[in-house]
Amino acid sequence: MSETWSVDDHLQDILRSVRPLEPIELQLLDAQGCVLVDEITVPTSLPPFDNSSMDGYAVRVADVEGSTEAYPAALTVLGDVAAGGGRDAELTVGPGQAARIMTGAPLPPGAEAVVPVEWTDGGAGGGPAESMAPRAADPGAAAGQVLVHRPVTAGQYVRERGSDVRSGSVALPGGTLLGPPQIGLLAALGYASVRVRPRPRVVVISTGSELVQPGGALEHGQIHDSNSFVLTAAARAAGAIAYRVGAVADDPDTLRATVEDQLIRADIVVTSGGVSVGAYDVVKEALSGVDGADGSVDFRRLAMQPGKPQGFGLVGSERTPLLALPGNPVSSYVSFELFVRPAIRALMGREPVHRTPVPALLTGEGVGSSPAGKRQFLRGAYEPPEPGEKHGSVRSVGGAGSHLVAALAQADALIVVPEETEELAAGDEVEVLLLD
Ligand SMILES: Nc1nc2c(c(=O)[nH]1)N[C@H]1C(S)=C(S)[C@@H](COP(=O)(O)OP(=O)(O)OC[C@H]3O[C@@H](n4cnc5c(N)ncnc54)[C@H](O)[C@@H]3O)O[C@H]1N2
Ligand code: MOO
């Protein structure tokens, strides 16, 4: 570990080696959260046919012109047209006729508009109907006569074929992130599966002989392994499929063997711990400087706090990116946010890979000096702008200590203190990264 790297140079070094994963065809729901590769065109217009937007009566406009409740238009009901195309025989609405029609049902030939049932007597005689008589309870209501109380214009309450999207137009451009509405559109267009960049598989390995899995009792000097949980959860939140490997003891051979075993299912390997300058810093010992087909990991010191010691390299025959994060819990999480999350997003083809910094005014106590020449990331609690205000505010939670997991759990933002800033006071404008 010789020269000091800037945060940006380290990140660029990682992103240079990360290419979007090869596309795969996924069933729609499996593609949720993935990025679409190809432009999707509309095979058939939506809606595919003119249809009713109301439960009511399909009519000819001239037949109901000037109608009122006192002087209703009386029309002969031919039968029902239901959504799904179910209808009574081959209905054609001729002069003086109407068809009972349900929302979503195709407008029958001859009809020009739909009168909502509330604008009629529903075929029951008397005043305005509140609803239609159910077909099963009253089959006669699909026949006989209906009194229409209000006129309609041509096309009223009719959803025209192609009024949503037209055949041949672009439904979704390549690069679209597939959320629920986009998946809904693909389904509406009839696509059962779609080509997307897959979710990267992230293997998380924590290291340290002091680590006990949650649920296990602690002897003196032991702690629970929390980093592998934070990092696995963070990888999932970033869109990856994450595999958590329980803590590996501080033994280089075991760690090397574990990494080799895991490579088969990894698009990225993330380790925590063992990258500093101690006598048991196993990740560094096991993975640094092993040149050749297996690749190697370069360990470096970064001008940041927390997160100073970091490792990065390409390992195994597939040259899989391996990010070795420091073991201090806050350091490992902040390092994930700054370096692993962008790498995951780059593999998924997601833009932008970075969180967009948001300006905020610093409030509260507990912020003072910041190390010169280092980019510092303080944990913050963010409040969005009040109505009419330009900036939200952020308050530092906990101190700068890299072991403060309880304060981290109170935070929803990272306050970015630039390298050149050495003093921070309430009222200063700062940039924050909002966490999910
Ligand atoms: N002489 C120096 N000592 C240290 C330096 C330095 O420059 N000179 N840097 C410090 C900084 S900064 C950091 S960050 C840490 C990084 O250390 P390692 O990556 O080698 O991490 P460990 O020594 O394995 O652990 C550090 C700390 O974190 C706890 N830990 C580790 N893994 C987990 C886990 N999975 N869950 C919860 N807690 C974990 C571990 O018990 C230690 O307390 O080095 C400093 N030292
Ligand atoms: O840089 Mo360490 O990551 O400060 O705790």
Image (cartoon, helix red, strand yellow):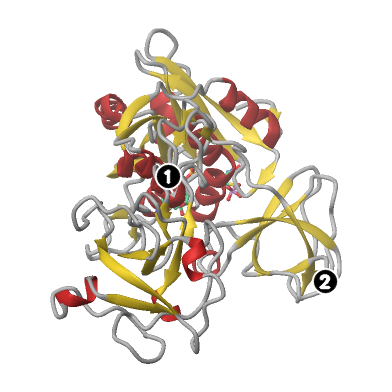
Circles 2 and 1: CB atoms closer than 8 Å: no
Residue 357 at least partly seen: yes
Q: Give the answer, above or below, for where 309 lies relative to 123.
A: above
- Packing grade of label 1 (10 A; few <14, some 14-19, many >=20) is some
Q: Which type of secondary structure does the marked residue at label 1 adopt?
A: helix
The residue at the point 50 percent across, 67 percent down is 409
Identity of the amino acid at label 1? Leu
- The image quadrant of residue 322 is top left
Would you name the residue on which mark 2 appears? Answer: 389
Identity of the amino acid at label 2? Glu
Residue 269 placement (x, y as % from top left): 39, 32
Q: Position of 215 compared to 208: left or right? A: left
Q: Give the answer, above or below, for where 155 lies relative to 337.
A: below
Foreground: 148 or 400? 148
Residue lying farthest top? 292
Q: Which type of secondary structure does the marked residue at label 2 adopt?
A: loop
Residue 426 placement (x, y as % from top left): 83, 71
Q: Position of 14 compared to 24: left or right? A: right
The residue at the point 19 percent across, 58 percent down is 88
Would you name the residue on which mark 1 appears? Answer: 185
- The image quadrant of residue 226 is bottom left
Residue 205 at least partly seen: no
Residue 116 placement (x, y as % from top left): 43, 72
Foreground: 77 or 181? 77
Q: Position of 254 compared to 35: left or right? A: left
